[in-house]
Image (spheres, rainbow, N blue to C red):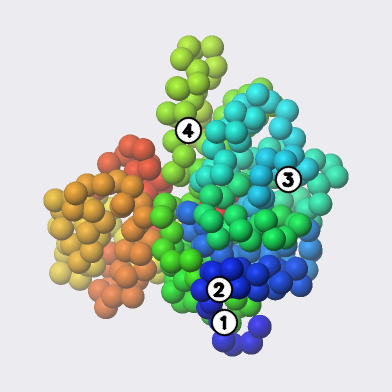
Amino acid sequence: MGNTTETILADADGIARAAEILRGGGLVAVPTETVYGLAARADSAEAVARIYAAKGRPDFNPLIVHVRDIEQAEGIAKFDTVDARLLADFGWPGPLTLVLPLQPDAQITAAVTAGLSTVALRVPKHPVMRQLLSLIDFPLAAPSANRSGFISPTHPGHVLESLAGRLDLILDGGTCARGVESTIVAVRPDRQWVELRPGPFDLQNQHDVWYDDTSKPRPIPYTGSTIEAPGQLESHYSPGKPVRLNARAPEFDEFMIGFAEIGGQYNLSEAADINLAAARIYEALHLAAQSDKPRIAVAPIPEKGIGRAINDRLKRAAA
Ligand code: TXA
Ligand code: MG
């Protein structure tokens, strides 16, 4: 490891080198369609311990396991509801994470699930991550590649800013297209869907497409007081400065993040494209964090589609 962290292009040679480092228990930042992940082999206690140490992440906060396909996922989790099947068939590969009962014989080290009886699984769509997963015969534990509690990375430069010297390699696959982390849904044994984190995959909409009657309860947001999804309960995505939401205009000492007709030093999308705003929100927060303004203001973002995920992250950034 050492103090310098190398960034290499995610071409065939680069991906092969990343696979070699991961086989040896190393840490590699890998692009996904949502954010960059800090990946290590999920079957190694030592490798996974290095993720927690590099991020400064509390060990009670479990990690998402990335697999290449449903078949590999079935060796790790139980897909014993029709809903788990439907969601996996429809949502994978893509920005959807399923929390399902852990298989008793899963080759996953206990630290990955923080001792829970469930596991979070995702089949990513990004071609670099897919190519990497096809070269290795173990799943990858990968949280977002940032120090715990801070802004998530959508670009190799963000990873370097946050974790330089704390990982072995950064695979440069450019900017992440979706820009916010995957939707996380727990599918309960009674088939209730519990939305643990809003994201690019629109659960409510998909539920309405599949169930046009009222016989099946709609997805509910997680409101429990126990720490089931710790990333959702603590202050997160912090730019290290006060953040004011729903701002119409900046104060003199604020870095303004605009949207649509409300301008600013950085506009998420003048054309009010909510998907573009999602792709750019973390870049905006990184720039705001680096600016010489001591405070940050953000224009209102519509609470629809992926806008729910943006507002969820902004609320935590402001907490
Ligand atoms: O898009 C993403 O999901 C990115 C990319 C890299 O795949 N990953 C990501 O990981 O956002 P992370 O560690 O930053 O967020 C994982 C979230 C945390 O809030 C964690 O508490 C929750 O998933 N989680 C993991 N396992 C869980 C489980 N068994 N039950 C409930 N929540 C779980
Ligand atoms: Mg994270």
State the SS at label 3: helix
Residue at the extreme bottom of the image, as rendered: 3
Q: Looking at numbered disc 1 in the image, what kind of residue is underneath it?
A: Thr
Where is residue 8 drawn, in percent x and y?
A: 53, 77
Instruction: Name the residue tied to disc 3.
Output: 72
Where is residue 286 drawn, in percent x and y?
A: 36, 68
State the SS at label 4: helix
Q: Does residue 181 show up?
A: yes
Q: Looking at numbered disc 3 in the image, what kind of residue is underneath it?
A: Gln
Where is residue 184 drawn, in percent x and y?
A: 55, 42
Instruction: Say which of 12 and 137 sits in front.
Output: 12
Instruction: Name the residue tied to disc 2.
Output: 170
Of circles 3 and 1, the one toward us is 3
Mark 2 Cα shell of 10 Å, populated few (<14), some (14-19), many (≥20) = many
Q: Looking at numbered disc 2 in the image, what kind of residue is underneath it?
A: Ile
Of circles 4 and 2, the one toward us is 2
Q: Closer to the N terminus: mark 4 or mark 1?
A: 1
Relative vertical location of residue 277 with respect to residue 40 in this rendering, above or below: above
Where is residue 151 drawn, in percent x and y?
A: 44, 64
Q: Closer to the N terminus: mark 3 or mark 1?
A: 1
What is the CA distance from the residue labelled 2 to the residue labelled 3?
25 Å
What is the CA distance from the residue labelled 4 to the residue labelled 1?
38 Å
Q: Count of labels shown?
A: 4
Give the left or right position of residue 263, taking residue 26 as reference: left
Mark carried by residue 203: 4
User: Which residue is found at the position 59% from the left and 65% from the top?
Assistant: 38
Instruction: Name the residue tied to disc 1.
Output: 5
What is the CA distance from the residue labelled 2 to the residue labelled 1?
7 Å
User: Which residue is found at the position 45% from the left and 44% from the top?
Assistant: 199
Q: Looking at numbered disc 4 in the image, what kind of residue is underneath it?
A: Leu
Q: Does residue 53 show up?
A: no
